[in-house]
Amino acid sequence: ETGVTQTPRHLVMGMTNKKSLKCEQHLGHNAMYWYKQSAKKPLELMFVYNFKEQTENNSVPSRFSPECPNSSHLFLHLHTLQPEDSALYLCASSSQGARQPQHFGDGTRLSIL
Amino acid sequence: DAKTTQPTSMDCAEGRAANLPCNHSTISGNEYVYWYRQIHSQGPQYIIHGLKNNETNEMASLIITEDRKSSTLILPHATLRDTAVYYCIVYRNQGGKLIFGQGTELSVKP
């Protein structure tokens, strides 16, 4: 149990569907992150939120839309995805300040049909 | 953030120490060395980090060379559950990004 919970664990969707991934952290952290991990590739940082404000968008296509309503919750809204978007999507959180490691959830395995 | 180089894969016998090397020759003075691991079907797990002194916690030890150009993660008594991909990352805490490379795939064998 890492303190970071992601739902659903698995998601299959068509290219025209709209779905959302949810992340919740119970660690009192104020920074949250979305990463993408495609098969045989390293983790790629997608978005960073600090105190609910987006501070990083790593050139992510607009079909991925993040939302951070408070410091404990993070969403990734998906629409009109492509087959190459099939991947493991990981959420992480951390405290601000020096030497604070990121804590990861176990991810949502997304498959686009 | 500086780049790291790790071996692609390593084997270790169960109960023996696993020593995982990492080269980070372009590390700068304000960059820390972090280690994470990712067990199959799980998210990455933080293990340990350090700046220039050796560090030890309940999971592992981190040995950083005096010139800080390389480091070694030591799992003192590897178990089958330590089989995972281990990532060495050089990271500036303020304004830096946690950039994952390919890591080392450690297989602990009975």
Image: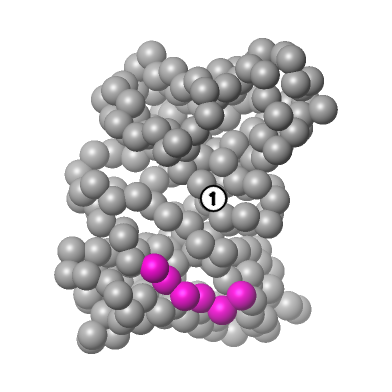
Q: What residue is rendered at 30% in x and 75% in y?
A: B26
* Residue B30 placement: quadrant: bottom left
Q: Where does the image place residue A89, in percent across and percent down from the top left?
A: 59, 36
Q: Is residue A29 above or below residue B29?
A: above
Residue occupied by mark 1: A43
Residue at the image position 24 percent from the left and 47 percent from the top: B95
Residue closest to the eye, B40 or A54: A54
* Residue A19, x across and y down, in percent: 65, 16
Q: Quadrant of residue A56?
A: top left
Magenta range is B3-8
Residue B88 is drawn in which quadrant?
bottom left
Q: Dot 1 lies on which element?
A: loop
**In the rendered image of this protein, does residue A92 appear above or below residue B5?**
above
Left or right, A5 with reference to A25: right
Where does the N terminus of chain B fall, quadrant-wise?
Answer: bottom left
The question of residue B4 being in magenta is answered with yes
Give me the residue at 75% from left, 33% from top.
A83
Amino acid found under the numbered disc labelled 1: Leu
Residue A102 belongs to the span the image colors magenta? no
